[in-house]
Image (spheres, helix red, strand yellow):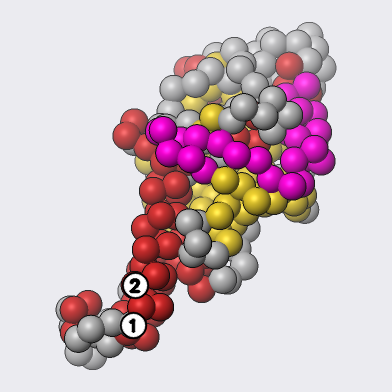
Amino acid sequence: MKRSSGVRLCAAAVLGALSFALVTGCSDGDPGGDAKDSGTAAKPLGAAELKKLIIADGEVPGYAVGPVPAARAQPITTDSAACRPLARVMSALPPAGAAARTGRLATQDKKKTPAAKPTSLDDLDGSAFEEAMRKSLDRDLTTVTLASYEGDGAEKALASVSAAVKSCTGGFPGKQAGTAVRFTKVAEEKAAGGGDGAVAFTATMDADGGGAAPVHAEVVRLGNTLSVYFTSNLGAMMAKKAYTVSPEVVEAQQAKLK
């Protein structure tokens, strides 16, 4: 059955946002880190120690946790020095280079309701097709990055995020894998992580004429260690449904660091 132009546009917008979310939703291999004790004298944790402290599969109810695929490690770059910490956080990197880092990807497990009459997507009309697509994509993808810093590096890195949120409210341009990315606005959100300090924000992306596509991030400091969280949910974007950084993931990770 021929689908409406609205559905085709919606699908196109999703695909445009999808490439962004899959790439920025995860990454692995950039240094960064912090230790548990606050204060500049604390020794930063090494990469091996961070790997023991980051969440593992089975530790976050409702989520599958695994390594971040290298194919999705394409960072966002920007010519705006003021907004660069935000671009790094949305690339699942620490806001500034650090002593050591490690990362994981937490994927929300949406249990499917058994259908009375399973059908192919090709058999669905426009509205049913769009709804099926939304439901299949409605799950949080959250990258978690632990990064350790020397001295007061973690405090300075967190402060750079706070300053960037205030400076970049009007958005900023960037590039990812050679493709232009435009964030139209940035807004501070209430942080959930606690610790010795935290900053959370929403960045809204222009999804190639498909409407606003918000993504969410939070950075939490505990001593010399930063926890960086970045969440995207394509189904929620399509449905214009509110979502946040996955609270279950933040709670599980912060609990491991205490």
To which residue does mark 1 refer?
4
- Quadrant the N terminus occupies: bottom left
Residue 80 percent across, percent down from the top left: 67, 29
Give yes or no for residue 51 being in the magenta stretch. Answer: no
Residue 204 percent across, percent down from the top left: 62, 54
**Does residue 50 appear to the left or right of 219 in the view shown?**
left
Q: Amino acid at mark 1?
A: Ser
The residue stretch that appears in magenta? 156-181
- Quadrant the C terminus occupies: top right
Instruction: From this view, report whether residue 36 is shown above or below residue 242.
Output: above
Label 2, residues with CA under 10 Å away: few <14, some 14-19, many ≥20: some
Residue 159 percent across, percent down from the top left: 80, 29
Contact check, label 1 and label 2, Cβ < 8 Å: yes
Residue 142 percent across, percent down from the top left: 50, 48
To which residue does mark 2 refer?
8
What residue is shown at x 62% (from left), y 27% (from top)? 79
